[in-house]
Image (cartoon, helix red, strand yellow):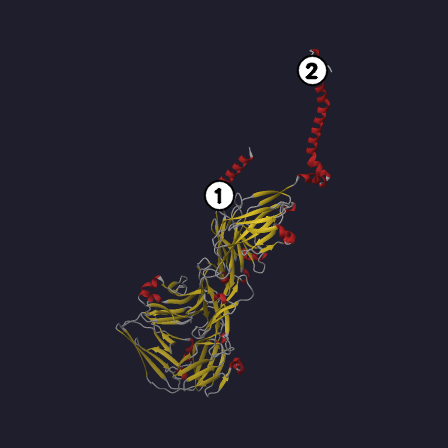
Amino acid sequence: MGLLQCLVAAFLLLLFTGLGTGQRVVTVQKGPLYRVRGSHVTLWCKVSGYQGPAEQNFQWSIYLPSAPEREVQIVSTVDPSFPYAIYTQRVRSRGIYVERVQGDAVLLHITELQDRDAGEYECHTPNTDERYFGSYSAKTNLSVIADTLSASMARQVLTRAEEDPVELTCEVSKSTVQHTHLSVGWYHLQGTGESHAEEVLTLSKDFVLRPGPSYMQRFLAGVVQLNKVGNTTYKLSIRGVEPSDQGQLYCEAAEWIQDPDEMWKDISRKQTGRTSLAVMSPDRHLSVDITAAESSLSEGDTLQLNCMVGAQKSSRHFQVLWLLNSVEVARVDPHGVLIWEEEYEERAKLGQLRAFKQSNTVYVLTIYEVGLKDSVSRMRLSVSTSTPRVMVGDALILFCEVQGAISPVSVQWWHLPPQHPGPRVLVATMEQDGTMSLGSTYQDSRTWGSLRLEKLSAGTFTLVIPNTLDEGDGGQYWCEATEWSRSQSRTEEGETAVTVSSMGLGLHAMLRSRIATVRYGQSFELVCQVNANYTLEEVPVSVGWLFQPSPPAGHYQKLVQVLPSGTMAWGEAQPQFQGKAQLTKAATSFRLYIHRAVAAHEGTYQCEGGGWKRHGLAPRGQPAATARSNAVGIKVVLPESNLQVSTKESSVEIAGGADTAIECRIVFAQNNSQFAVTWYLLPPSPADATPLRIVRANYSNILEYGAEFSSPAQKSRFLSQRLSSNVFWLRILSANPRDQGRYYCVVEEWLWLVDGWYNLGERASGRTTLEFKLPESTVLSRICSSPPLLNFILYLPLVLILLLALAVFCWYFKFGKSKKGNIAGDELMELQGAGGVKKT
């Protein structure tokens, strides 16, 4: 079979085998992904275009940030010995495992994410194909962040009559640096042992209200509502409860993040404690009345209370509860059995309390030697603050109002910092006589300032903390008021919450991707979303835009800053942005709009938020605190080059000392482009020799010679010339054998783009081989100068030919000449015999 036939057969074999197989592609979940510490995380991986069995195998590895080049094996679907030692135990205990979704798709599960799990994950599929074709692994990045989500709701036991209203509040907060959304919902459990919770009403991450199926009609009618009434407070309102609402209610908050594949993922969920709700059916034919023999008593007197129950049907039996200030004291069941609460059982045994059923409609409670604790006129307490949200360094002002007290009152203030599991801390105490004392934590006036506890009026007490130190001064504050009478006392308490915010701001700049690509002349926009632990109306905020050109040239440079007053201050280092950048503000979003991008706009951008105190301690003209966003890269793509250069291969043969020219021809280019041409020489040996740069003519035709051609002699022999708009020559004067080799040119296309000349691209030409033709007079000298063995090998055929010619020549003179003489003699004799020759 000939060479051509072999090539055709190989091509057809490759073609038909290629048509029958696909290209293997491994795809992994797109990153970077952000997941919270302690959560259950899944990463998917799938393979397509493969040959072999339908059930493919998968191997997961990680590249840790501390050693990004080193592969650490985690888990495999086929090899139990695959995990490295640090993962063996977690894989064996199913803390890390692979779930096969289908034959060619799996999920990697990490049941409890740890900080050390952050890194670049690689999913690899061992080859089952007849040949390697395609990709066999893919990578994604996973970052581990702190879980900052919190949700709390006060535990309550509520009893409501049917159609009565109920309101529940849930406090939800987060401080995640990344851009996340919250969803908040209420759920209902029918009984204490019930495991399936029914959705009542949820405010989704997209700020859409979604009722559960059982609550849809009541939601549409406006009976069930959910409202956000503060930065962190969400209130569920049921305007009229129904018997089906009885059970347990709790609040659940979820934090959501948008992954690079634009899918939203819940990264944290928190549930609050449960509130028990009992719904009583009203009896419109039942009446209850209570009377007292005396309306005003002194300590030591006897109090008798009569409870009279009326109903249309006298055959009914009742259960009667006696309550003091909404707290149960005793009950008489329908059979007349008396049950005392534990707190009052001892007094009943001592004869100080008595309760009995006088008749089916009259029930009696008698208290002998009444005291302050038995007062029916309840002391009421309300706690409030005029500073619910303050900045660090500002003052806290708290109020405690006591009403209904008939004896002297003492007051104690207690504090529990936010998200603090420990006991409450005593802040200050005021005794009945007005004497004030401070808790041990608050006695340093240099730290807290002159903390004050004052009695503003008969029942109003105020606590002032002049100087808050940090966020820990926020949280819950309790006021305990104690009414004293002889040896007895009664205490009521109330609480209020305050938030103390530092100047720390959580910021990020949002784009569709972390590295955005824009075309030259195209406009683009950056959005800086300012998040804070307080409303931006409370504290003036400035925003600054920072820029680092590409490639980086040191630190970020100030592009522009917008002060709280609205004044803009441009950075002197970035004049190319003036006239092209526009700044706008809407709510908490700050936007930087760049009009018609140029190459100088390529680089990395950040925004920097600053919080300014109205009466702060920061230096004049400086924010009290700043925070920077993540960096966003912008790449400006120049106009695409359409340059085409002739790639035709050619050869030139010249004699020594002659001049020659190598041609470089542009086939196609834009009309307004300029060109720089660089000439190269590839020496004939060795085969992998590095090209030598001869000379470069830039777009202004300024010449720059390479190191090997920079001597005056070489510069005078190698010249770059432009013959026309698209033809360039390399002239070689007085060529010699050392000039042999392959020559080619590289053409760069340059275009003027508003702010300067830019290289759009470059193309290389085909090679022109320069061969040197030696003069005949130099052949012998070359022979003489060559090594003997090489001469013998090279010129042996020539010597043999010369020897053969010499042999023929000798034969001719020896044999051919004598034969010719004999013939002449014979002819002479014949002529003589005929008499045709005259003797002389």
Q: What is the three-letter code of the residue carrying label 1?
A: Thr
Report x, y in % for residue 268: 46, 63
**Residue in front for this viewpoint, 812 or 110:** 812
The quarter of the picture where the N terminus appears is: top right
Q: What is the crowding at mark 1: few (fewer than 14 residues within 10 Å), some, or many (at least 20)?
A: some
Report x, y in % for residue 560: 48, 69
Labelled pair 1, 2 in contact (Cβ < 8 Å): no
Q: Is residue 530 above or below residue 366?
A: above
* Numbered disc in front, either 1 or 2: 2
Q: What is the three-letter code of the residue carrying label 2?
A: Glu
Answer with mark 1 or mark 2, whichever residue precedes in sequence: 1
Q: How many marks?
A: 2
The quarter of the picture where the C terminus appears is: top right
Q: Is residue 297 left or right of residue 465?
A: left
Report x, y in % for residue 604: 51, 63
Q: Which mark is residue 21?
A: 1
Q: Is residue 618 above or below residue 518?
A: below
Q: Residue furthest left?
A: 312
- Which residue corresponds to the image point at 35% horizontal and 86% vertical from the top-left? 296
Alpha-carbon span between mark 1 and mark 2: 93 Å
**Residue in front for this viewpoint, 565 or 79:** 565
Q: Which mark is residue 513?
A: none
**Residue in front for this viewpoint, 279 or 375:** 279
Q: Which residue is mark 2?
A: 827
The secondary element bearing badge 2 is classed as helix
- Which residue corresponds to the image point at 62% horizontal and 54% vertical from the top-left? 706
> Looking at the image, can residue 421 be seen?
no
**Residue in front for this viewpoint, 516 or 337:** 516
The secondary element bearing badge 1 is classed as loop
Q: Residue furthest bottom?
A: 433
Figure quadrant of residue 586: bottom left
